[in-house]
């Protein structure tokens, strides 16, 4: 395990750091991502409670990069249900309280597409958005979904948002039984700015665990919700159902972090609303919208 983790760290995330052109991840990329999700060397445990664990990794070469790994045990949630929840963009708009806007742009292959996602950051930080190439791979009873940032000519950076860069972000879902699974979320993101220390600490100690728990609640309610909302429409399982237009890889380019503007927010203080309300009200546990 240690040898595998070390080799992954040395190579870096192949989809971005090892390639100058946009490519759909191959089997080696998925294996590399899985190894990093399972690796323990170099990760510092910062949170462990009620079946949720969070690790962070110090990026010594560039401290603006933030690498975080979350793992959650999901009882009463089959792996395939969690996989559907992460794919279902209409349902995400119901349960993901941080989302501002999200939509699919185009499909590249039967297991890869390009999409847009913008999210709320802890106040008073500026909100962020990304354009990503997302790919997925079922592996028996396990699943991987992962993405990295790309440039799309029709979706340049917006003035009201900071364009962040996903170097490599994704989920490993591992079945542990007919009605249980474990999910690992791994993210290496350049937020394009120097963030204050309270944001980094809050992400690992509060925001990440809360997001995982909210995802679990969404999974429990998903089968009932899906029965009322196009129950047979699952283009991630049935590519022929996809309404998205096709897009050639040549239309995209790799989004290098150094080509985007950096925003210095290192001196920004946490707002009183954040301190009192936890996530500025955005992370409310009220899940009545899931019905």
Image (tube, grey):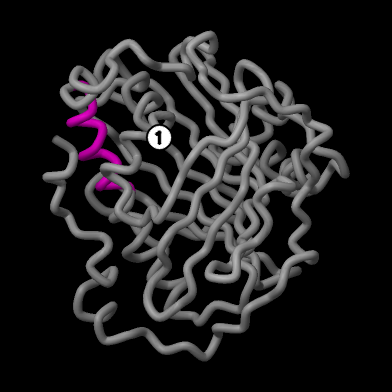
- Tell me if residue 217 is in the magenta stretch: yes
Examine the residues drawn in magenta and state their main secondary structure.
helix
Q: x, y (%) of residue 251?
A: 79, 36
Q: Quadrant of residue 16?
A: top right
Q: Which residues are magenta?
A: 212-223
Which residue does the image show at 65% across and 51% down from the upper left? 155
Q: Is residue 165 left or right of residue 235?
A: right
Residue with the mark numbered 1: 89
Report whether 24 appears left or right of 276: right
Question: Residue, x 32% and y 64% (percent of image)?
Answer: 206
- Mark 1 lies on a secondary structure that is helix
| Image quadrant containing the C terminus | top left
Closest to the observer, 57 or 273: 273
What is the x, y in percent for residue 228?
A: 18, 21
- Residue 87 location, x and y as percent? 43, 29
Query: Relative to residue 170, is residue 187 depicted above or below?
Result: below
Q: Which is nearer the eye, 63 or 150?
A: 150
Question: Quadrant location of residue 92?
Answer: top left
Q: Image quarter for residue 27? A: top right
In the foreground, 107 or 10 = 107
Residue visible at 31% across and 35% down? 91
Quadrant where the image shows the N terminus: top right
Looking at the image, is 28 positioned above or below residue 148? above
With 93 as the anchor, is 6 left or right in this view? right
Placement of 289 over or under 145, stated as above or below: below
In reply to whether residue 247 is colored magenta, the answer given is no
Using residue 14 as the reference point, say whether residue 157 is left or right of it.
left
Residue 233 in the image, given as x and y percentages of width and height: 37, 15
Nearest the viewer among 231 and 8 is 231
Binning the other alpha carbons within 10 Å of mark 1 as few (below 14), some (14 to 19) or many (20 upward) gives: few
């Amino acid at each position: 395990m240690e040898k595998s983790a070390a080799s992954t760290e040395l190579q870096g995330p192949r989809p971005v750091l090892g390639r100058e052109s946009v490519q759909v991840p191959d089997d080696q990329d998925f294996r590399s991502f899985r190894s990093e999700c399972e690796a323990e060397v170099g990760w510092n445990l910062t949170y462990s409670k009620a079946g949720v664990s969070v690790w962070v990794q110090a990026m010594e070469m560039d401290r603006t990069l933030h690498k975080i790994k979350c793992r959650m045990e999901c009882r009463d949630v089959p792996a395939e249900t969690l996989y559907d929840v992460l794919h279902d963009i209409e349902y995400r708009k119901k349960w993901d309280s941080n989302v501002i806007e999200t939509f699919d742009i185009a499909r590249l292959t039967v297991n890869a597409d390009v999409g847009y996602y913008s999210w709320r950051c802890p106040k008073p930080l500026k909100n962020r958005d990304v354009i990503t190439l997302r790919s997925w791979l079922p592996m028996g009873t396990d699943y991987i979904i992962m993405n990295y940032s790309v440039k799309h000519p029709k979706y340049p950076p917006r003035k009201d948002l900071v364009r962040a860069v996903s170097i490599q972000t994704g989920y490993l879902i591992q079945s542990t039984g007919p009605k249980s699974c474990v999910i690992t979320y791994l993210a290496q993101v350049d937020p394009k700015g120097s963030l204050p220390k309270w944001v980094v600490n809050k992400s690992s100690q509060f925001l990440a665990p809360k997001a995982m728990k909210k995802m679990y609640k969404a999974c429990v309610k998903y089968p009932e919700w899906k029965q009322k909302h196009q129950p047979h429409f699952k283009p991630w399982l049935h590519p022929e159902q996809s309404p998205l237009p096709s897009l050639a890889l040549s239309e995209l380019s790799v989004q290098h972090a150094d080509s985007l503007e950096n925003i210095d927010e290192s001196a920004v203080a946490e707002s009183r609303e954040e301190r009192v309300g936890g996530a500025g009200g955005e992370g409310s546990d009220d899940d009545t919208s899931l019905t």
